[in-house]
Image: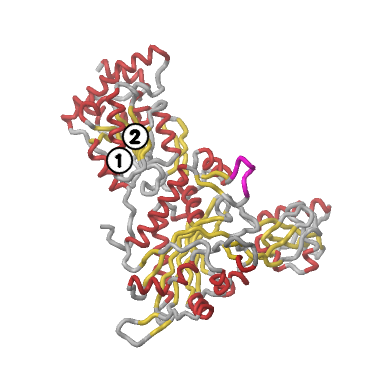
Amino acid sequence: WFIFSFLKELLGLPRFPISGVAWVQAGSPVLSVQSDRASARRPGTGASRGAGASSMALAVAPVLCLARRASRGASLSRVGFSKRRVATLESPAAEKEEFQYKIDLEGLVSLCKRRGFVFPSGEIYGGYGGFFDYGPLGAELKNNLKRMWWRRMVHSRDDVVGLDASIVTTPKVHEASGHVDNFSDPMVDCRESKKRFRADQLMWAKVELEDGTEVGYVSMVEEGNVEEALKKAAGKLKKAKSVDGTIKALKIKDMTEATEEEVALIPSPATGQPGSLTGARAFNLMFETNVGPYTDAASKSYLRPETAQGIFVNFKQVAYVTRMKIPFGIAQIGKAFRNEITPRQFIFRSREFEQMEIEYFIDPEADFKETQEEWIMEMWNFLKAIGLKEELMEREVHKDDKLAHYARACTDIIFRYPFGNSELLGVAARGEYDLQQHMKASGEVMNYQVPGEKRKFVPHVIEPSLGVDRLFLALMCSAYDEDEINGEKRCLLRFHPCVAPITCCVFPLMKKPPELRELSQKLARTLRNRGYNILYDEAGSIGKRYRRADEAGTPFCCTIDFDTIEDLTVTLRDRDKPEEVVRMKMDEIPQFLDKACELPMFGQDSN
């Protein structure tokens, strides 16, 4: 008892009765303090108070191990990882509250750069607008997202196969699809600042008083709460003009709706002065390139603006070689390029991006709305499974006058980013438009022959399309959190284990004795051989190593301590429940990770 009392005073543990058995029972208040206090302030944790305290810590570490071993006759419990948060002295159970962001877009950009998720492309030369490089953690997270999507949408289904079409193809493909003539955004120039704006994203309103007095015009680039921002701008304009009266309700429009007379009166967002904006005109978004040794009209081609056309032109061959029967889908993950007028909001709208798309071919006589709804739910459940917060997601059905020229219907899944609600993915009913266009342009028949029947038809298409980069950003937003452990603020990313960039960190408690390092490296090798990305780290205190792992989104950490040498058990720490301590056999860790990293399969048997 004297030893334990002494340890409590030395380690700063709470003053409550404790026995040798309670000391080692998982989930006890003492253990919950111990887990993130560098595993009960073990040696090498940076918790020492000078050389004397450091020496004393070395002396008490074996005593802690002996105490745990002595109590194992009382059956050391293993704490399960349930979805319910456990209430302890350190972390009382909290009632569920509406989600509030604890970080803004600027802070998220900083985090991504600091921890190696995303870098500006060519930053040593000042960067290059609309292009980004994914760092070590970002590359792992992005690849995990693509792998989970492919596993869920292709490998776990009997009715979807994969394809990887080329980025550059004959320009006839883009001519037939209508991209060469019609793939454009309306653009507005500011003659004074030389800046360009997308006309449908440059919002404006006429400012009038209730008595009909015209005050002027206000404008802004669409972002956040446009109505509120323009109201404030209108109030400032009224004050600057020194006029009295109540401002009428603003009628907000975009620049595609402005008349020639109004264009001359609308101020440029770049200068704040009217008269410098041009009218809206079409700007083709495709990147041109040249194929071959000569630069002439015959060598001109394009970087694909979407991955879908590669699927359509290969439809007939894929159906033949796979012997797939309709309904079936062709999936593809790949790069696409759009020369955006104003890339913005970090990686949300960039000029080089990656898409995950499925073209699902159905019978024209089938109920396309039912199939579309099935894919909407499939995508919704996938987003939930990988860790997006459902309260940040909602549906948006396109009205008939807002549909693309090829679409019969379209529903978007909208995500609430820190900068506002924006499209994350879309599920469109494209009809037979694309296949018919390629049939006309190529002369190749794209009919599907119904097996055992004389009936032929051109299939209709349901297209679930998801941007990898937008999903990456949405997941970063959903995962970021802040809390306190023992009064210390902690920043962390709560990634699902199946997508986390680093699945598990392996830490030796100390660099010496050599057995700690050898056992740690052995465990790391074993887990890597199972296909997991493992970080081995022996630098710094154990507490600092935990914090680094938390900020990288690592769900589990295994600490090899003096007990491990004796009985081959390790301390398993869960990022989301740091107040709990679990002792687990080394040879049980691979099976534990296999189970924890399973991607939940909705609507199907995951076995």
Mark number, residue 506 = 2
Residue that mark 1 sits on:
527
Q: Please provide percent x and percent y for residue 474.
A: 49, 52
Question: Residue 424 vs residue 561: left or right?
Answer: right
Q: Amino acid at mark 1?
A: Leu
Label 2 with label 1: CB-CB less than 8 Å:
yes
| Residue 23, label in figure | none
- Nearest the viewer among 580 and 434 is 434
Marks 2 and 1, how far apart in space?
10 Å
Quadrant for the N terminus in the image: top left
Pointer 2 local density, CA inside 10 Å: few below 14, some 14–19, many at least 20: many
Q: What amino acid type is highlighted by mark number 2?
A: Val
Q: How does the figure colour the protein chain or chains?
A: secondary structure
Q: Residues within 10 Å of mark 1 (few under 14, many from 20)?
A: many
The part of the chain drawn in magenta is 122-128
Q: Quadrant of residue 384?
A: bottom left
Residue placed farthest to the bottom in the image? 454
Of residues 33 and 255, which is closer to you in this image? 255
Q: Earlier in the sequence, mark 2 or mark 1?
A: 2
Q: Secondary structure at mark 2?
A: strand
In front of the other: label 2 or label 1?
A: 1
The answer to if 339 sits in the magenta stretch is: no
Q: Is residue 542 above or below residue 318?
A: above
Residue lying at the far left of the rendered structure: 73
The answer to whether residue 285 of the structure is visible from this angle is yes
Residue, far right: 242
